[in-house]
Image (spheres, coloured by chain):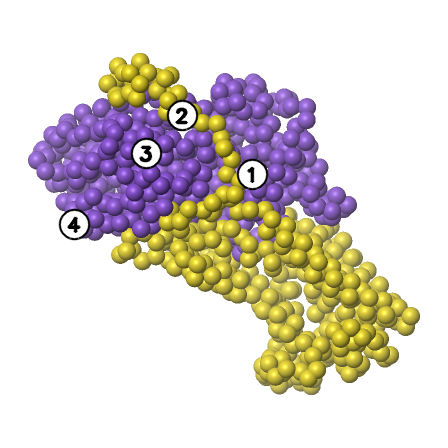
Amino acid sequence: MAEATPKPEQLVQIDYRPPKRDWMDPAVEFRKGTFCYSATSKSLRYLEMPNPREWQPFERDWKLPPNWRETILEGMRERLARYRGFRLFMEICVRCGACADKCHFYLGSGDPKNMPVLRAELLRSVYRRYFTTSGRLFGRLAGARDLTEDVLKEWFYYFYQCTECRRCSVFCPYGIDTAEVTMMGRELLNLVGCNINWVMEPVANCYRTGNHLGIQPHGFKDSIDFAVDELEEITGIRVEAPINKKGAEILFVVPSADYFGTPHYYTLLGYLMILHEMGVDYTFSAFASEGGNFGLFTSHELIKKLNAKVYSEAQRLKVKWILGGECGHMWRVLHQYMDTMNGPADFLEEPVSPLTGTRFENARSSRMVHICEFTADLIRHGKLKLDPARNDNWRVTFHDSCNPARAMGLLEEPRYILRSVSNHFHEMPENTIREQTFCCGSGSGLGTDENLEMRLRGGLPRANAVRYVKEQHGVNLLTCICAIDKATLPALVDYWVGGVEVAGVHELVGNALIMEGERRTTDLRGEPLPGKEA
Amino acid sequence: MSVLYSLGAVVALSALAWVGGSVAALHPLFGVWLPYAAIIAFLAGLTWRVIRWASSPVPFRITTTCGQEKSLPWIKASRLDSPSTTLGTIGRMALEILLFRSLFRNTQAQLREGPRLVYAESKFLWLGALAFHWSFLVIFARHLRFFLEPVPGCVLLLQDLDGFFQIGAPVLYLTDLVIVAALVYLLGRRLWAVQIRYFSLFTDYFALLLLLALAGTGIWMRYFTKVNILEIKRLAMGLVTFTPVTPEGIGPLFYVHLFLLSVLIAYFPFSKLAHMAGVFLSPTRNLPNNNRMKRHVNPWNPAVKLHTYAQWEEEFHDKIKVAGLPLEKD
């Protein structure tokens, strides 16, 4: 795959002029590098999902079930009755086009069906045809079209070419949320077994083992133990990292990439250092070993299934409240879905920081606190001894991850932390950060290598802003609070920018933290710590 | 093509009304019964539409946050763009509905050499939309002088303000200029911007052309042909007092104006124009960002099959044991 990827100067030749062909005539070419492979039947069988089979999107025959059209239309009917947002978003768009150039995939591909308005019209045109009188009577003139296999293929292509980042929804005068439209589109596709492996395998793994990567309990313990050993080598201090410890005060849930991926891993080390230094009584769970939730990229039912273990483990382990690590979509689920789906969490207590006494009022119902809220509070109260000079080798910028920005409003906490642990913090241009942040281009389960060209296209706006601060301020570190970002931004910035590393916010906290009795000469990556060079 | 069909439709509707206005026998139809039917369609249609929206629940609180959440006491929360209270949410909605807050954010992206993506401020769409909607509202309110006797002071005041510059006779209303300019801009933008033209549908052009024709006929009557206002008022008063009359000597142009209005209001609830009502219900805007403070209830929260801890422990029992992790059942 990788050798087929065009060079940046080729990829950036983007033609924004729409094609001659009317958008209502479906035409999708499944060109390598621009789509994701299908889910294996094994994953679907494990999850008892419809139509498990061997097939690929580029094949002619998708082996759809004979009644696929009725299944989809019935699925639409159900969802229109269950989700006001869905019905509303099918009906009130005026096609003003404000969203058009807000999508990173549109900016990176020039494909008009990546304009959020047209992405939604793919579904709306079918909605009009089967659910409105004008659509039934006037057909194309009313913007209605039949649901054909080609339309379904188009749905697959474009609903798996949307990262549900919600940037367009910020600009829409009616708040139409393409993430919601895409989620419905994907739910419908799932009804007839059209899904992608990069999503469904993690979902199946997560359902079985508790985490997306399919790491079994002993593997989880090994990973955490390994981190503890490594931290001892770096700091000379042996921290405790309890797992499945009953009666701990806090359950700590992180995305699985934190203990299995790089550079996520350095963030995990950062967490362990703070929790140790503060003497927090906490535990991991080897079953709730994943905060992330690829159910969000599949269906509401699967969100609930995968999320349930967070509260059930908190209850079983008899903790008081829950702390969550750095992750984007995970926090969309924890903030906007968990309490509704699997609450109320009345067996927990309202979260209070054991060190500062701060009541996390904003989490008084769901009883789950974001690690950035927790750490920012510690720093504000002067509980952490920090030496920002230890990060002087980094000139830092911050990428707001889509979901913490647009589904939580977690904007200042990470910035406060970064300013406290670094002397060189530079913002990217204002139209590319905070609520207007650009997606990494690989969110919502699209971060797979076979989809690399499309990821690089979608990531262009983000990478371009990184390049700007690199040129202006010599930025060499892109920080973020999302596991998917950490997994996919390195390839993106290497491709478009070069010379910029990616890190979690808590990695920098770990670097700057002065621990009691430490012996340190390196940062968490094993590089010489500024000021401590031999 | 869509734009031509729309233009054809508006021309045909106008011609139809011209015929209706020219034949005395058709005056009751075009002057009374069609307007009544349109009003009924508007009220019934919009009620049906809103009830149908309202009958689908909002299972999740999916607010789009456009500012800092309320979290730690020393971090300034964005009370309007990420409201955590009802009051803040009302404020957010008011900004959205009265001032088109979200559209105000609009930017235009441009890919330049380098490559460098730049995002230029782009307020024209916001300005055009705001100018159109507010002038429409003012014009609508001004028209109350035809339907109320005596004419309320506030309507007269509005009329005076609208004609503040005292240009010409009859006095030129600013909103008449503004609405035409705004509609021409909105239509022009749809036609010249290739991307927007690409996805524009019949209804998008039809609504704009219908409004333009409606405004155009109104302007023509006021400034150019000078229709018999007193007789028109008699007709209007007849409609609102349910004692319909169709006075002589009004002229076909008025009937075109009235018919286009009837078409507009009858079309309203069954088209994208219903966004006027829909915007109030948009779940990404009308819900506070207080998800973790206050539980949102999903009325149909389904029971799902779960993979429980007990099943997990059973499957991995030996491995958990070897790893030295605690077990519920040894």
In 3D space, how far apart are the residues under numbered discs 1 and 2 (Cα atoms)? 27 Å
Residue A416 located left or right of residue B113: left
In 3D space, how far apart are the residues under numbered discs 3 and 1 (Cα atoms)? 31 Å
Which residue type carries mark 3? Ala
Is A252 drawn above or below residue A60 in the view shown? below
Task: Specify whether disc 3 shares its chain with disc 4.
Answer: yes
Other-residue count near label 2 (Cα within 10 Å), few / some / many at <14 / 14–19 / ≥20: some
Is B34 drawn above or below residue B220 in the view shown? above
Q: Are marks 1 and 2 in contact (CB under 8 Å)?
A: no
Residue corresponding to mark 4: A382
Residue corresponding to mark 1: A184
Pointer 1 chain: A
Q: Colour of chain B?
A: yellow
Provide the secondary structure element on which disc 2 rests: loop
Other-residue count near label 4 (Cα within 10 Å), few / some / many at <14 / 14–19 / ≥20: few
Which of pointers 3 and 1 indicates the residue nearer the eye? 3
Q: Earlier in the sequence, mark 1 or mark 4?
A: 1
Residue A424 located left or right of residue A491: left
Other-residue count near label 3 (Cα within 10 Å), few / some / many at <14 / 14–19 / ≥20: many
Residue corresponding to mark 3: A314
Is A188 drawn above or below residue B206 in the view shown? above
Q: Colour of chain A?
A: purple
Provide the secondary structure element on which disc 3 rests: helix
Which residue type carries mark 2? Thr
Which of pointers 1 and 2 indicates the residue nearer the eye? 2
Q: Are marks 1 and 4 in contact (CB under 8 Å)?
A: no
Pointer 3 chain: A
In 3D space, how far apart are the residues under numbered discs 1 and 4 (Cα atoms)? 46 Å
Q: Which mark is residue A99?
A: none
Residue corresponding to mark 2: B308
Task: Specify whether disc 1 shares its chain with disc 2.
Answer: no
Which residue type carries mark 4? Gly
